Image: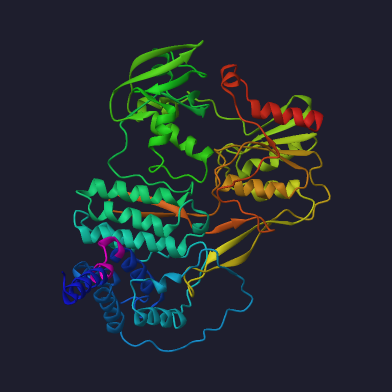
Amino acid sequence: MISMKKITLFLFIIFSQTIFSASKITETEKLTATCKVWGFLKYYHPKAAIAGINWDNQLLEKLPKIEKAQTKEEFSLILENWIDNLGPIKEIAPIPAPKDVVFFDKNFDLSWFNNKLFSKKLSKKLKFIEENRFQTEEEFGQGFDSFKSIKNYFDLDYTNKHYRILMLFAYWNLIEYYFPYKYVMDQKWDLSLEQSLPSIADAKNEGDFYIALKKLTSKLNDSHVESPIYGTKASNYFPATGKIIDDKLVITEILGDSLAVADNIKIGAVITKVNGKTIKEFAAENRDLICASNEAKYLDKLVSLILSSNSETVTVEFLKDGKYETKSMIWSDYHDSHRNEFKKGAIKPKEKFKLLNDNIGYVDMGAIKPRNIPDMIEALKSTKAIVFDMRNYPNQTYNLISDFLNAHNEKFAIYTYPYPNYPGKYIWKEGTSSGIENKDNYKGKVIVLLNEDSMSQAEWTAMCFQTAGNTTIVGSQTAGTDGNAIDIDFKKFHTRYTGMGVYYPDGRETQRIGIIPDIEIKPTIKGIQEGKDEVLERALLFVETGK
């Protein structure tokens, strides 16, 4: 029989191993928690938040110690000592709330202070720092520099694991505290950090690191985000562009006439495969590499990826009259494949405005400029309707046009700006108005055409025109990204993000949603092949029938 002493010893060993195992922590757990602490201290600690201390080097010095920590007790002690070594913090709590300020808190979350890896002592230190945080006199607004000392990141060697981790931490915390739309991401930003850490820590070369970082940027669900890796751009292109409709790519514009003629490529041509891959497969495979606010903009961005290649010879499958035909094509460099953009006279200058049949005006918002507005008003002021085609990017003409459209001054947008004295919190700003007191304002119908090409300033301008009171939006979902775009450049990598929140005056959101059309209409393959502009046609029908 087994003695009672042996049973007790056995149970003690099992219990001890269980406790020890539970106390051990993984590298991802340690780095995730370290990222949050480092970023929090960077923006909150009075010593770390001011110039004069190299906060990046502080992290690089601590990483080897953090890697060696085996238990949460050891890990917590490293972070506690780090905070203590920064010196005492002057107790200033409670910090008075600013007067006449309304906070926007949907992005704010410091609940991680109570992380299971942290000792109670560490959690208390973090809370104390929050309550006695760094206060700045710095003005905040669209130009607020939340990244700080970005130029330092051009010199980092990303073949070094610790430098890769530093760059990840810097970027993640920038978004954590200074991205206004964090709360509408598909995935929690914490989870994105956890998922990206292993691939960034274990990257075998710079290329692997940049791809991992690119995948992280896609989690922002923000159409402003572009994340090109320098030197990896495709070298060969299809001589046209198009739209994805019903899992097919339909050609809508010829970019290189001679090359298109050589391969008999015409507007309305339907592509079903490129190098044996269907459009649906392209869409599924690139979800982590393309950042977009919604599906409409994702498919729009996907087109350029499908129609570019690092190979010169490309097989393309077309669908014509119900039959599939595969061609082996030679794709050319950007200059030749987009020759119409460079060739003088190849593209006719767009009409900025014109009079259509039945006394209806038309304005191309991508072509018209402020200096053209007086002539446009004079030519179209007596029309029964004006169609403002905003399936493009406008040229800062919103104010002059709204003065013509509106009978009164009307607010059309309000904003959220980051609040540096409480990082992670935003404040509501009063917003923008347009229009003037004008008894001679335009009395006809105002029609605005929108689609996935309508992005940022186009969406903002559409919001402005909606205040006219007689405005109808015709088209489909817009890009769903409004606000200023902030660019970030560092060694071999460029990205951007939206830096301020944009809302309707009643608080309705625009990010990811876009401007919702009153009349939804999308182009069809048949319509494109017949040379129709179905969106414009639908707008004209509305002018005539009122429905």
> Which stretch appears magenta?
20-29
Residue 175 in the magenta stretch? The answer is no
Q: Is residue 430 visible?
A: yes
Q: Quadrant of the C terminus?
A: top right
Q: Is residue 334 left or right of residue 99?
A: left
435 or 414, which is in the foreground?
A: 414
How many labels, in total?
0
Q: Quadrant of residue 36?
A: bottom left
Q: Position of residue 276 (x, y in %)?
A: 35, 22
352 or 405, which is in the foreground?
A: 405
Compared with 424, 206 (above or below) is above
Q: Residue shown at 28%/72% (left/top)?
A: 72
Q: Residue shown at 41%/12% (left/top)?
A: 325
346 or 413, which is in the foreground?
A: 413
Compared with 269, 515 (above or below) is below
Q: Quadrant of residue 282?
A: top left
Compared with 338, 8 (above or below) is below
Residue 22 in the magenta stretch? The answer is yes
Q: Position of residue 200 (x, y in %)?
A: 27, 53
Q: Residue shown at 48%/39% (left/top)?
A: 298
- Kindly give the residue lying farthest to the right in the view shown: 439
Q: Position of residue 124 (x, y in %)?
A: 40, 82
- State the predominant SS element of the stretch in magenta: helix
Compared with 225, 248 (above or below) is above
Q: Is residue 136 left or right of residue 521?
A: left
Q: Position of residue 407 (x, y in %)?
A: 80, 51
